[in-house]
Amino acid sequence: MKEKLQTVGVKYDEVLKRFMGKEDFYLRMLKKFLDDKNYEGLKAAVEEKRWTDAFTYAHTVKGLCGNLGLDGILEYAVPLTDEVRSEPYDEEKIVGYMEQVTRMYEQTREVILSL
């Protein structure tokens, strides 16, 4: 499990400390992450250029990824959140970051499903 998660940017030993060494609990939380609808909401908000909603979703995704140590997604969710935080909006940057978030989300999703 450790090696697979490391391929998507998880600093496994560091994250496991946050979960008091309880690997089974961490795995349950990762699987719950896949059920969370904030990523889908973010994706729709960006596609529809609803920037205020995009900020709310991006901020939530950023927090979830930070708590779970999903640094591969977090690397792009942080600047995405910053871009949709306030006007003027740079749509090119927003779309670029969203593409990277999507790429990393899909990779991370596949890894979690394989655990």
Image (cartoon, grey):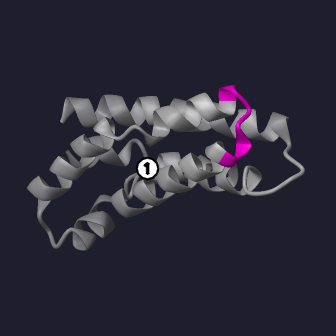
Magenta run includes residue 76: no
Residue 29 % position (x, y): 22, 51
Span shown in magenta: 47-52
Label 1 sits on a secondary structure element that is loop
Quadrant of the frame with the N terminus:
top left
Q: Tell me, yes or no, if residue 115 can be seen here.
A: yes
In this image, 90 relative to 72: left or right? right
- Does residue 51 belong to the magenta stretch? yes
Q: Is residue 3 left or right of residue 6?
A: left
> Furthest-right residue in view?
88
Q: Residue at x 49, y 47 (%)?
A: 72
| Residue 59: % across, % down | 56, 56
Left of 76 or right of it: where is 7? left
- Neighbourhood count class around disc 1 (C-alpha, 10 Å): few under 14, some 14–19, many 20 upward: some
**Above/below status of 108 relative to 79:** above
Q: Nearer the viewer, residue 33 or 38?
A: 38
Across and down, in percent, residue 112 comes to 27, 37
At x 21% / y 30%, what residue is drawn? Answer: 114
Please tell me in which quadrant of the rendered image residue 91 appears: top right
Q: Which residue is mark 1?
A: 9
Q: Would residue 24 be found to the left or right of residue 29 on screen?
A: left
Q: Nearer the viewer, residue 86 or 17?
A: 86
- Residue 83: image location, x then y, percent: 76, 51
Number of marks drawn: 1
Q: Amino acid at mark 1?
A: Gly
Quadrant of the image containing the C terminus: top left
Can residue 104 be seen here?
no
Tell me the residue at 45%/42% (across/down).
38
